[in-house]
Amino acid sequence: MLRIVNRVLLVLTGLFLFGVGLVAVVAALDLPRRWGFSMPSGWSWRSPRDVLLTRADRVQWRDEGWWWPVVIGGLSLLVLLALWWLLAQLRRQRLAEVLVDSGDGVGALLRGRAMEEVVAAEAESLPGIDRARVTLVGRRGQPRLRVGLLLTPQARPDEVVRRLRTEAVEHARASAGLEALPAEARLRSARHEVERVS
């Protein structure tokens, strides 16, 4: 979710800055006069000597009763959204613990780092996997695994993924007593060094 919000914010900010820059270039180079086109009616920035907002534009609503509450409310909302976004960026992506149903109604907590290490060690013991990095994400009651695998040059990716799912991930799911443990695997192949024949 956070990744999508970041991308949307970046696209909107980029489009806004591109539009402002384009308008500034058009006005600064006096392109409407040179190329013979006109800017929209009510547009105050028409030539290099003009400003974006005239004094009349800046003060026209100051005497209205709704103006200052709207300005203060809008800026406050903008500050709150910026703080939410900043805190979301700083929040740890890695899950610290997993809630395990112990059968007594209370539950137990399993350290996320321990589960990551066990899944990584079991994955590295599988044939075709050189190295494995495992990150536990999600919520305590619904964890997910992100697995990065470095495959040996002789590995068969379909076989590696099948065994990862049926062995390492399934063992972790069963031992933690979880109903489901979704996993996302990213595969990379190790470089194969060329052997010289002398």
Image (cartoon, rainbow, N blue to C red):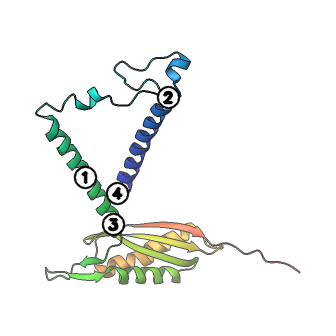
Q: Point out the tag, 4 or 1, that comes first from the N-terminus.
A: 4
Q: Point out the tag, 2 or 3, that comes first from the N-terminus.
A: 2
Q: Residue at x 41, y 83 (%)?
A: 118
Q: Which residue is mark 1?
A: 79
Q: Are marks 1 and 3 in contact (CB under 8 Å)?
A: no
Q: Secondary structure at mark 1?
A: helix
Q: Is residue 64 above or below residue 101?
A: above
| Alpha carbon separation for disc pair 4 and 1 | 18 Å
Question: Residue flagged by tag 4: what amino acid is it?
Answer: Leu
Say left or right for 105 vs 133.
left
* Residue 90, label in figure: 3
Q: Are marks 4 and 2 in contact (CB under 8 Å)?
A: no
| Alpha carbon separation for disc pair 4 and 3 | 11 Å
Report the front residue among 62 and 140.
62
Q: Which residue is mark 4?
A: 2
On-image quarter of the N terminus? bottom left
Q: Secondary structure at mark 2?
A: helix
Q: Are marks 4 and 1 in contact (CB under 8 Å)?
A: no
Residue 146, percent across and down? 42, 69
| Alpha carbon separation for disc pair 1 and 3 | 17 Å
- Camera sees residue 67: yes
Q: Residues within 10 Å of mark 1 (few under 14, many from 20)?
A: few
Q: Residue at x 34, y 20 (%)?
A: 42
